[in-house]
Image (tube, rainbow, N blue to C red):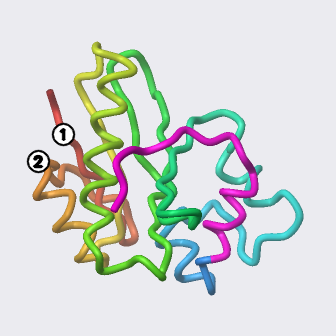
Amino acid sequence: MFKKISHTTNIADLNQAGSWVNDQAQCTAWAGDIVRFPFLGNSLVDDIEFTQHQHFIIKIHDDLAAFAQLQTINPHHAHIGRLIINPKFRGQGIAPKFFKMLTDKAREQNPQISLITLNVLETNLTALRIYAAQGFEQYRFLPPDVIQMRSRF
């Protein structure tokens, strides 16, 4: 189906991923409560600090299938955020493979990485299962409904 993830700096990829979000609740689940919805002008670019972090995608044929953000917090800590799968490709096993590729990419880019974190809504049971299956543990609750997960290496 797909073999690799690609780094992107293309705002069109971000805008396409944003088009998969239909309402404020989905926006908050995907990008957190600091992201304004609906996306107007450059609000999405600004709110996720697109130019300050790395972004990765998967394409299947010519279709954007997945998008995520990889942040370097410090030389030992990376954070994966804003992972989203194109609705056309959901349920096909892309998310676990993409997530594994992202964690591998973080460690490949910086062998000093000893901690990778992510945030997920407590109601996103599918994501919680995917992350737990790859060794991430719940370690902090951020009110009102966000679970912070981590993996140590």
Residue 139, above or below 64: above
Magenta residue span: 1-19
Look at label 1 and name its amino acid.
Ser
Q: Let me know if residue 13 is in the magenta part.
A: yes
Q: CA distance from mark 1 to mark 2?
A: 6 Å
Residue 122, above or below 87: above
Identify which residue, 41 or 138, lies in the foreground.
41
Q: Let me know if residue 30 is in the magenta part.
A: no
Q: Residues within 10 Å of mark 2 (few under 14, many from 20)?
A: few
Regarding mark 1 in the picture, which secondary structure is present there?
strand
Identify which residue, 2 or 47, lies in the foreground.
2
Please say if the residues under marks 1 and 2 sit with CB atoms less than 8 Å apart: yes
Q: Position of residue 41 (x, y in %)?
A: 89, 64
Look at label 2 and name its amino acid.
Gly
Q: Earlier in the sequence, mark 1 or mark 2?
A: 2
Q: For mark 1, what is the residue?
A: 151
Q: Position of residue 153 (x, y in %)?
A: 14, 27
Q: Residues within 10 Å of mark 1 (few under 14, many from 20)?
A: some
Regarding mark 2 in the picture, which secondary structure is present there?
loop
Identify which residue, 60 or 58, lies in the foreground.
60
Which disc, if any, is residue 135? 2
Q: Is residue 9 left or right of residue 29?
A: right
Res. 33 image quadrant: bottom right
Q: Position of residue 10 (x, y in %)?
A: 72, 46
Name the residue at 51% across, 51% down.
Answer: 57
